[in-house]
Image (tube, coloured by chain):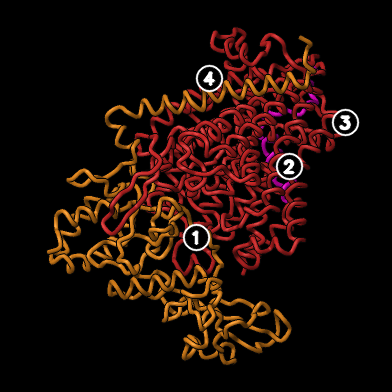
Amino acid sequence: MSETTAGVVFIAAMLAALALSYKPLGDYMYRVVTREHHRKVERGIYRVIGARPGTEQNWAGYARSVLAFSVVSILVLFLFQRVQSALPFSNGFIGVEPGLAWNTAVSFTTNTNWQAYSGEATMGIFVQASGLAVQNFVSAAVGIAVAIVLVRGFARKATDKLGNFWVDLTRIVLWVLLPISLVAAIVLIGGGVVQNLTDFTSASTTTGDQTITGGLIASQEAIKNLGTNGGGPFNANAAHPFENPTSWTNFVIIYLLLVIPFSLPRTFGRLVGQNRQGYAIAAVMGVIALASVSLVVGFENMANGTVPQAVSAAMEGKEVRFGIPDSGLFAAATTLTSTGSVNSFHDSYTSFGGGVLMLDMMLGEVAPGGVGAGLYGMLVLATITVFIAGLMVGRTPEYLGKKIGAREIKLASLYFLVTPALLLIGVAASIAVPENLESMQDAGPHGLSEMLYAFASASNNNGSAFAGFGANTPWFNTALGLCMLFGRFLPIILVLALAGSLAKQKPVPATAGTFPTHKPLFVGMVVGVTIILVALTFLPVLALGPIADGLQ
Amino acid sequence: MARLPRWISQHLAALRAVLVLTAITGVLYPLAVLAVAQIPGLAGKADGSLIYDDAGNVVGSSLIGQEFTDADGEALLQYFQSRPSMAAGETGAYDPLASGASNLGPENVVDTLPDPELGWDGDANAAKSLLTQVCERSLAIGEREGVDGSRPYCTDTGIGAVLGVYYSEGTTGDVTRVVSLNEQCDTTETPFLKEYEGVQVECAAYGDDHAAAIITPIAGDAPADPQVPADAVTASGSGLDPHISPAYAELQTDRIAAERGTSTDEIEDLVEEHTTGRFLGFMGEPAVNVVELNLALDEELPLT
């Protein structure tokens, strides 16, 4: 079998695995978030928190809880890193310096997992497992909870009650993320991912000495991908043999980072009582994702560019055991979701291959997107599509029985504008300061690509990087930190507000004039709207970066 | 006790939530996985797939690559060589404390030349482009294995073949001046190309700024499919890649057989034993584990 054929089969197998999980996982998540009865362990947790599980919140109350939880999370994680040296299992590392600790706390709380540090040289076992990995769980749960609230907005009638944040958070962590992570971690250990409490092991190798690192890696590897976080314990992330030792653990990891985002449309379909609406959203995600995967893998196989042609393959920054197609799929999957873990290094990708990865993030990470964030992003785009379709035929647009009026479309438009604004203003402001140009490792258009990638990654809470970029400066730690914060929480507030305004409405009955939102026409329109909106926003700057780079 | 303002009680609730969820997902969960990892069959893997010698000392991990070079970084000819590694720490390359990639882009083709008085090793500002690194490695491996180490876009001397071309109108018009950007005057007798578009090619003088020139890589006439395989001239993502491609292993078997005074067949059998194919026939790429292979070489065909 040729490398390309094997790659195609690999992608097809991934597609099959995701299709098989769609119904069972989607239905299961539906049952978790709708179950009336509170289990004993849940009630115990609510008592500790001081939450009243019977009381539902309106959108503003829900938003206040989300924000309070996230602010406290940032503070706790910041302090945790600062006092590292006084804690056990710190591997002898000192406390993380304030700028970096702030950047990292924001990064993990916002589900970004941008890492301006090298894991094995900065963070001990305790901070990794009990600080960073905890945010891998809870930031993922926050994303899913917000998506569920938006869906409740569509599904509920004439109410301002949208659920209880503490209930949603607890249940998603306990019954969705924990059990899958537990199983996945053990499977990964079977492939060779490490799980121990040893900081360093000295080896006398054939020719000298080597210090072999340890840690609670498997448990973190599982959730960092399942929760589309991406922040790995090691600098080399999932290219590191202790995180991703074999070709099949590579398959498992890619599956983990795609499975929840691709199954959530099913949960959405169940909640609104029409499974076909879920299929339509999943189809939009699938079409865009397949196009992106084909482009990335295709460009990497073609190996255009001076160095790839000199080498005869785009092999720089890639591992032998994965090969080029499976590395390309990983790269596409990690940028299409908000994961940002990498099994190969994007900075060394071909110009066009790297450009598609950037575009994946600029799409707003909706195909399928981060856990929860992908679904709510896609539902906002569907709302905009319904509005545009309504303009075409001159009818008041409606989606799932809810009128899309002035307030709804304002919120949806603001949502869409947040990340492009952060990204483009961030890049423009950074370029205007001459010393920032020193952070670019490569000269010419590729240098711009590096900076563009950094802001695309931070604003969309991805976390991957063109890692040659020197981001650990006061300017970039601050600017990228702000992009992560605003890029996460402004959209969340807007989505919750949208949910509130939808839930208040009484549904309008569907008539012969209602635009059906479960047919291929609608799927095609959402794909079109997504691509046109993003292309109009970003083509000029992409032309100066990756496109100029590739046409040299 | 007076009731706390709502915004304070809300944040206290959040703090309690963070703490209880930390206990569950940050302590119980990893320790539960750790407990399961102690069962036989998993324990060795969870500890890092460590390899022990007869005396019980750790000699490496079968998952973490090693370099097989002498103190000066020269290849030890009796061992299979690993891929280039960017995980350079205090103990040389393949340092697990410094995992990582080069992160150099596909058009990283112009060297930052060193001050001639200091040389490449002495001048901290000097940097070889990714292209020159690839060319240099290919040439060295070709010489070591007795094959043609030439590659497209590389000079015969193992440097990136890149011209800086000046045009009369900036980016268009007649060629007015051509500089071979990576060939420094004091180490270059004649540039790899005599003329370009009728203009004589100059060597590059230290300190000259050629930002106004159009960067023009020259493919040359080397075969598009070079004899030294791709993985041999590129650094991996982790810098710890324990594998090489079967093609790179095959390129090295003759040398190993000669060094160890045995037949090529015997070496090929050993390589075969330490090659993993694609999992289920389609996952990943075939790979040869260099660390295990070299340990097997020392055990079965010790140097006399």
User: Are tags 2 and 1 found on a single chain?
Assistant: no
What amino acid does circle 2 point to?
Val
Q: Secondary structure at mark 4?
A: helix
Write down the chain letter for disc 3: A
| A214 horizontally vs A525: left or right | left
Q: Are marks 4 and 1 in contact (CB under 8 Å)?
A: no
Q: Which chain is red?
A: A
Q: Which residue is mark 1?
A: B102
3 or 4: tag closer to the N-terminus: 4
User: Are tags 2 and 4 found on a single chain?
Assistant: yes
Q: Are marks 3 and 4 in contact (CB under 8 Å)?
A: no
Q: Write the start and end of the magenta stretch as one range.
A: A507-535
In the rendered view, tell whether residue A404 sits above or below residue B81: above
What amino acid does circle 1 point to?
Ser
Q: Which residue is mark 4?
A: A175
Q: Is residue A250 visible?
A: yes
- The residue positioned 62% from the left and 42% from the top of the image is A101
User: Are tags 3 and 1 found on a single chain?
Assistant: no
What amino acid does circle 4 point to?
Trp
Name the tint of chain B in the rendering.
orange
